[in-house]
Image (cartoon, rainbow, N blue to C red):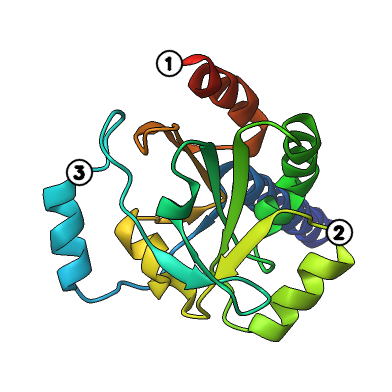
């Protein structure tokens, strides 16, 4: 009887542990697990700064259609940068929030810019189309070594940044469900 009770307790603990682990992942996001070697980009970013009020580092990468897109292309507009990936559960779970923001700010001086950390760019393109994600998407296929992710020191995703009309960081490393208030504040700034 004791061995049966021990077996039930072990299974109950295992189920509890798995549930807690999945819950923690959905709350914290997908984290970078491997360490990247120090690069010149990292050293440059430390000199540039990534604090609220600092100038947002520019980056250039291709969109899903092969067109070159730079952050500086959107000067004069509020930009919501959404670092994400198709393989990240919390990122996929936040897509409805991003869709709501895209609808809410359509026709206003707001750009939503998804930066994917996907390696498989064909899968990424299909996902964007299948999910009807009708905003600007860029990626370079370099996973955690994505050029913009390195510049912004992204260690977990999803990670949303708000850049004001003057190219200054107004919010960093927030979630999409908190971005609306930050976008409104950035729009209200003169």
Q: Tell me if residue 80 can be seen.
A: yes
Spot occupied by residue 48 in the image (x, y as percentages of width and height)? 17, 48
Residue at the image point whose x is 40% and y is 56% from the top: 155
Judge whether 112 appears above or below 10 on screen.
above
| Secondary structure under the numbered disc 1 in the rendered image | loop
Q: Earlier in the sequence, mark 3 or mark 2?
A: 3
Q: Which residue is mark 1?
A: 190
Q: Secondary structure at mark 2?
A: loop
Q: Nearer the viewer, mark 2 or mark 1?
A: 1
Quarter of the view holding residue 35: bottom left
Q: Where does label 2 land, which residue? A: 132
What secondary structure is found at the residue carrying circle 3? loop
Q: Which residue is mark 3?
A: 49
Q: Which is nearer the N-term, disc 3 or disc 1? A: 3
Q: x and y percent of residue 51 in the render?
A: 27, 35
Q: Could you say where residue 96 lies in the image, as x and y percent from the top left?
A: 80, 43
């Amino acid at each position: 009887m004791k061995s049966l009770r021990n077996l039930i307790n072990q299974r109950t603990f295992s189920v509890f542990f798995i549930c807690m682990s999945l819950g923690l992942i959905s709350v914290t996001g997908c984290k970078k697990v491997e360490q990247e070697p120090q690069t010149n980009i990292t050293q440059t970013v430390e000199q540039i700064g990534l604090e609220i009020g600092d100038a947002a580092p520019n980056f250039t990468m291709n969109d899903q259609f092969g067109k070159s897109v730079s952050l500086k292309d959107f000067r004069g507009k509020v930009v919501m940068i959404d670092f994400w990936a198709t393989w990240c559960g919390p990122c996929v779970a936040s897509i409805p929030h991003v869709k709501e923001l895209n609808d809410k700010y359509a026709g206003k001086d707001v750009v939503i810019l998804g930066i994917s950390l996907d390696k498989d760019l064909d899968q990424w393109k299909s996902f964007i189309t299948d999910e009807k994600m009708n905003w600007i998407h860029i990626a370079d296929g370099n996973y955690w070594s994505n050029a913009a992710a390195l510049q912004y020191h992204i260690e977990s995703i999803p990670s949303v940044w708000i850049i004001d009309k003057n190219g200054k960081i107004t919010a960093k490393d927030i979630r999409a469900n908190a971005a609306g208030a930050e976008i409104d504040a950035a729009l209200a700034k003169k």
